[in-house]
C-alpha cells in the first residue's frame, strides 16, 4: 500500500520496451503513487501501456506536452480522458486560447477529476539557452511566474516547474495550486541532462505537490531499493 509520501512520487517509465515497463510497474506500484508515460513509450506502446498503469492501481500521468492549435488540443485531451489519464501536460507557451480549450475539453469529457498541468520552462535549459531561445531580457524566474499566472487564469490545475522556482511560485499562487517537479536527484547522483535540479527532500520542503523521478530509480540495479531511498529522503 502506497503511503502518503509515496502518493507524491511519480516514477517516469522512460524505458525501451513494454516488458521493462511491466516489470517496473509490478515492482514499484506498492511504493509509488503514480507512473508517467512520456512521448517515447507512448509512441511505442500507447494505450496498452496506459492500461498497464491503470490496472496496477497507480495514477496515470500522461506526459505528452500537448502544444498545437486549440481544436487539435481539444481532440488530444478528449482522447487522453478516454484512456483514463489522471494527469496530463500541455505547454503553456501554446497560449490562452489553447489552454482554455484544454480545460473545456476536460469538462465536456466529464473528467473534471483529471489534473491538467502546464509546462513552464523545461528543466534542461541553461540560463544562456533560455535567453537565446526566447530572445528576451526577462529572467527565467519572471517567465516561469508569468506562465504560472496564465495557467491559473485559464483554469489549469497547476504547472510543471523546476524546484528552484518552487518558492517563487508558492509565494504568488498559494499552497493549493499543483506544482509537479522534475529534475530530482539525490545529492550524490549524476545530473545527466538536467540542469536545474534539487534533492527529493528539498523539493518537498519547498512545496512540490508531486516529484518526478526517472533514471535514479529505473536505471538502478535495484529499482525498488532506489525508490525506497527516494521516499526516505522525501520524508526526512
Image: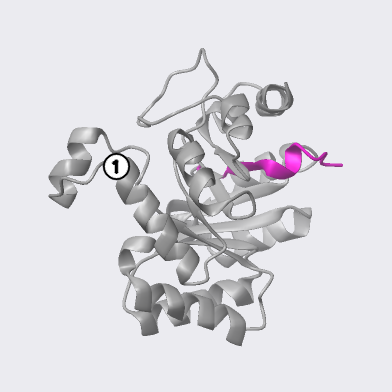
Q: The N terminus lies in which quarter of the figure?
A: top right
> Which is more toward the observer, 197 or 24?
197
Q: What stretch is highlighted in magenta?
A: 1-14
Residue 71 location, x and y as percent?
Answer: 38, 85
Q: Residue furthest top?
A: 188
> Does residue 105 lie above or below 55 as drawn?
below
Residue at x-position 60% and y-position 28%:
200
Q: Badge 1, how many Cα within 10 Å: few under 14, some, many 20+?
A: some
Q: Does the magenta stretch include residue 70?
A: no
Q: In this view, does 154 lie above or below 140?
A: below
On the image, the x and y values in percent for residue 175 come to 63, 49
Secondary structure at numbered mark 1: helix
The correct choice, above or below, for 122 with respect to 232 in the image is below
Quarter of the picture holding the C terminus: top right
Residue at 83% of width from left, 39% of height from top? 3
Residue drawn at x 40%, y 64% is: 150
Residue 17 is at least partly visible in this image: no
Q: Position of residue 64 (x, y in %)?
A: 45, 60
**Outermost residue, right direction?**
1
Residue situated in front as seen by the camera: 84 or 93? 93
Residue drawn at point x = 49 percent, y = 36 percent: 163
Q: In this view, does 105 lie to the left or right of 221?
A: left
Question: How far across and down, in percent of the image, does residue 126 sit?
Answer: 26, 33
**Which residue is label 1 attached to?**
140
Amino acid at each position: 500500500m502506497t503511503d502518503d509520501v509515496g502518493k507524491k512520487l511519480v516514477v517516469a517509465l522512460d524505458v525501451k520496451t513494454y516488458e521493462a515497463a511491466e516489470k517496473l510497474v509490478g515492482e514499484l506500484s506498492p511504493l509509488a503513487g503514480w507512473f508517467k508515460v512520456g512521448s517515447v513509450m507512448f509512441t511505442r506502446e500507447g494505450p496498452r501501456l496506459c492500461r498497464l498503469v491503470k490496472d496496477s492501481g497507480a495514477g496515470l500521468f500522461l506526459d505528452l506536452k500537448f502544444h498545437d492549435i486549440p481544436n487539435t488540443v481539444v481532440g488530444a485531451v478528449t482522447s487522453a480522458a478516454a484512456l483514463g489519464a489522471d494527469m496530463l501536460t500541455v505547454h503553456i507557451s501554446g497560449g490562452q486560447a489553447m489552454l482554455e480549450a484544454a480545460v473545456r475539453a476536460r469538462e465536456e469529457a466529464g473528467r473534471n477529476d483529471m489534473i491538467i498541468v502546464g509546462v513552464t520552462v523545461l528543466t534542461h535549459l541553461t540560463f544562456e539557452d533560455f535567453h537565446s531561445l526566447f530572445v528576451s531580457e526577462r529572467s527565467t524566474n519572471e517567465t516561469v511566474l508569468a506562465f504560472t499566472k496564465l495557467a491559473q487564469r485559464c483554469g489549469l490545475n497547476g504547472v510543471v516547474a523546476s524546484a528552484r522556482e518552487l518558492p517563487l511560485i508558492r509565494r504568488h499562487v498559494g499552497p493549493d495550486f499543483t506544482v509537479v517537479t522534475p529534475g530530482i536527484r539525490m545529492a550524490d547522483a549524476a545530473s545527466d541532462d538536467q540542469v536545474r535540479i534539487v534533492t527529493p527532500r528539498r523539493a518537498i520542503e519547498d512545496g512540490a505537490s508531486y516529484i518526478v523521478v526517472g533514471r535514479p530509480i529505473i536505471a538502478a540495479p535495484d529499482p525498488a531499493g532506489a525508490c525506497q531511498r527516494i521516499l526516505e529522503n522525501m520524508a526526512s
